[in-house]
Image: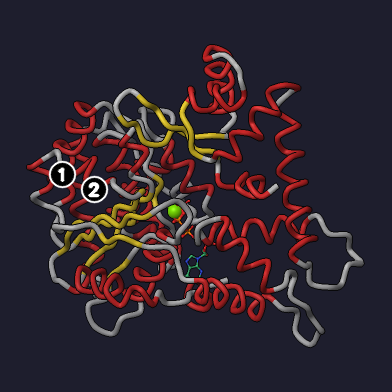
Amino acid sequence: MSVHEAYIPRAESVTTADLITNFLRNPGGGRIVVEGDQGVGKTTFVNFHRQCWEKAAKHKLLSPALELEMQSNWDERGLLINLLASLSSRIRLEMNNKSFVKEELLHEITALVGVNIEDTGGFNATLSILGTGAGVGRTQGKAVIVGEVTNDLLRQYFRRLVSFVLRRGYSGVIFHLDNLDKLGVREPENLKTFFESVRDILQEPGVYFIFVGNTGLFQKVIVPLPRVRSIFFDTPIHLEPLSLTEVKMVMDRRYHLLVAPGKKWIVPVTTEVVENLYTIFEGKIRYIMNSITSLISHLPDSYAQPLTIIQAMSLLQGIAISEMKRVLKGAEQEVFLLAAKLNCFTNSELGTHSRKSKQLIQKYLKNWLSLNLVSRAEKTGRNQFYKVEPRFAVLRER
Ligand SMILES: Nc1ncnc2c1ncn2[C@@H]1O[C@H](COP(=O)(O)OP(=O)(O)OP(=O)(O)O)[C@@H](O)[C@H]1O
Ligand SMILES: [Mg+2]
């Protein structure tokens, strides 16, 4: 499904759409952060906007097909290799093989990021690029002999590749770097080193960097680094959850796009179910749609009626409970159900409610964290809060 067909513009966001449009319209490149809670539609928002600029009549901006997932172990080299690999494979998509191979520059870059995978560290980039089907692959024909490649040389390639794109009639390049959070888990000192070392790359003329992350990331990651902050757009673009009407529109649009032509069809769930899920998941569309997908995959083939709220909720609770039972045993299950009811809690709160010792709760928490059943939330003073993963929110109403 193309983002263009499936996208519903965010009404809250005359301003958010304006902000990103103004940012990208501004000649010469720039750096901005887009943030919001989990699953509210950040990645989609950025994908939609960068696709718009590829088709723009004037001031066309080229962008790699997919967003780049930032990795916690990225350094300058990791970043450069990812930028080079994703941009060169994007260029390849619009050139035939023959002319691609004829371009010395592209040939060399492909050899660097596509062939010599084993030679140097940090090349997981290439694997993920291959996985997306964008296809860096091997260069054809000539073999390029690659010696030890310095970061300096990679930076030069980056600059030349961007100029190459500009010569082909584009006004710039957009890089969409998703999950800035992953870098946030680093020690402040390492984070600082990373940003200081990539500061020049981020200022390459004609390049627009859009960093996407959770609410509060700009404050946590960028603001404490004055030299880095000074090259960023002053404020992050903050995305709120879509409204209930918008969520309904997204789903309706999808039903129509996906329906088999000429067949009769029914919606999978009633409107009440969507409304209830909207409340349970606080508007986070990812979780709302995942629940519906999960309901559909648990329906018998012959079932041909929209699920009512009672059916849907008991089915969803059943699914969540069996997921929990697969990984937790005995008493731990009961304590987890309590945790799901509390949603956000500290060790001692859960201990009080379940009448279990602090040590036992600690042991459970460690296990749940490793199983991704809960995640760490905010810390106030010495109190560490934990949050149950949103997909278990359906258990709260039991
Ligand atoms: N405006 C929109 N129009 C149509 N579909 C949307 C819109 N916003 C989000 N979606 C859909 O909602 C789902 C979740 O969105 P997305 O992945 O962009 O959220 P996210 O905020 O990036 O999540 P995460 O925090 O997990 O990275 C996707 O399937 C996406 O297609
Ligand atoms: Mg995302």
Above or below 393: residue 11? below
Left or right of 358, for residue 14: left
Placement of 72 over or under 288, stated as above or below: above
Image-quadrant location for residue 321: top right
What percent of the width, then of the height, locates residue 292? Answer: 68, 61
Look at label 1 and name its amino acid. Val
Towards the viewer: 44 or 144 = 44
Residue assigned mark 2: 218
Q: Secondary structure at mark 2?
A: helix
Relative to 87, residue 334 above or below: above
- CB atoms at circles 1 and 2 under 8 Å apart? yes
What's the amino acid at mark 2?
Answer: Phe
The answer to whether residue 20 of the structure is visible from this angle is yes
Can you tell me whether the CB of the residue at mark 2 lies under 8 Å from the nearest atom of ligand 1?
no
Q: Residue at x 59, y 60 (%)?
A: 288
Decide: few, some or many residues near mark 1? Use Cα within 10 Å; few <14, some 14-19, many ≥20: some
- Identify the secondary structure beneath mark 1: loop
Outermost residue on the right side: it is: 302
User: Can you say which quadrant of the picture contains the N terminus?
Assistant: bottom right
Residue 166, by quadrant, is bottom left
Residue bearing the label numbered 1: 223
Q: Residue at x 26, y 63 (%)?
A: 173
Label 1 vs 2, first from the N-terminus: 2
Q: Residue at x 62, y 44 (%)?
A: 392
